[in-house]
Amino acid sequence: MSKIIWRICEVTFADSAFSGEGASIVGGRWNSKGKRMVYTAEHLSLAILEVFVHLNVPTVRRDFFIAIKAEIPNDLEIEYLRIDRLPSDWYLSSSRSSLQALGDEWIDSARTPILATPSAIVPQEFNYLINPLHPHFDRLIIDLPQPFNFDSRMWK
């Protein structure tokens, strides 16, 4: 059976949600500026947490975010990056540059279209990083965006 992954982003970026453009502009935990990467999570709930920890506002307009489900076909190779291969402080923001070096090397190598990394929020679960420039990227099955709203109780 294929693997389902999720991405949450602002509705204004719906058309470019899987382009890696945003991560290229600002950089991320696993990529430097200038490197395209798409951040997704193995569960919708993890995708919610991954976005929530970066929000600075107690309320968000109800039409601000979307959730996009994508499917990874069984025969599309995924490279798994296990915790024991990471620096001991990998989950801290201070380790960003060493993680970016790992992610940049993976992007540049084009070994696989997808890299599974442990979540710093829930290390027992995986985020799936996608190389949108990989030759097999087009094999992902990306659904239409659907409205998503954060529950206001999350800010209590």
Image: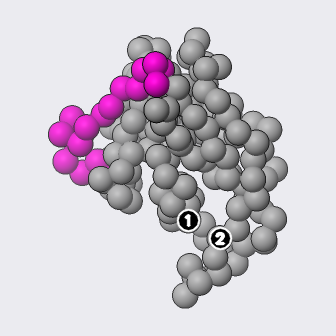
Q: Position of residue 144 (x, y in %)?
A: 76, 42
Evaluate if marks 2 and 1 touch, with contact meaning CB atoms under 8 Å apart: yes
Range shown magenta: 74-91
Indicate yes or no whether the magenta region holds residue 80: yes
Residue 103: % across, % down: 42, 30
Amino acid type at mark 2: Phe
User: Would residue 65 appear left or right of 43 to someone viewing this image?
Assistant: right
Q: Is residue 5 visible?
A: yes
Give the camera-side residue of 114 and 142: 142
152 in relation to 80, above or below: below
Q: Residue at x 61, y 38 (%)?
A: 70
Query: Cα distance, mark 2 to mark 1?
Result: 8 Å
Q: Is residue 101 visible?
A: no
User: Counting other residues with Cα less than 10 Å from the Cα at mark 1, is it few (<14), some (14-19), or many (20 or more)?
Assistant: some
Residue for point 53% across, 30% down: 72
Q: Quadrant of residue 16?
A: top right
- Residue wearing tag 2: 150
Q: Quadrant of residue 66?
A: bottom right
Tell me, for residue 52, which label it has, or none.
1
Name, please, the residue furthest toward the bottom: 156
For mark 1, give the secondary structure. Answer: helix
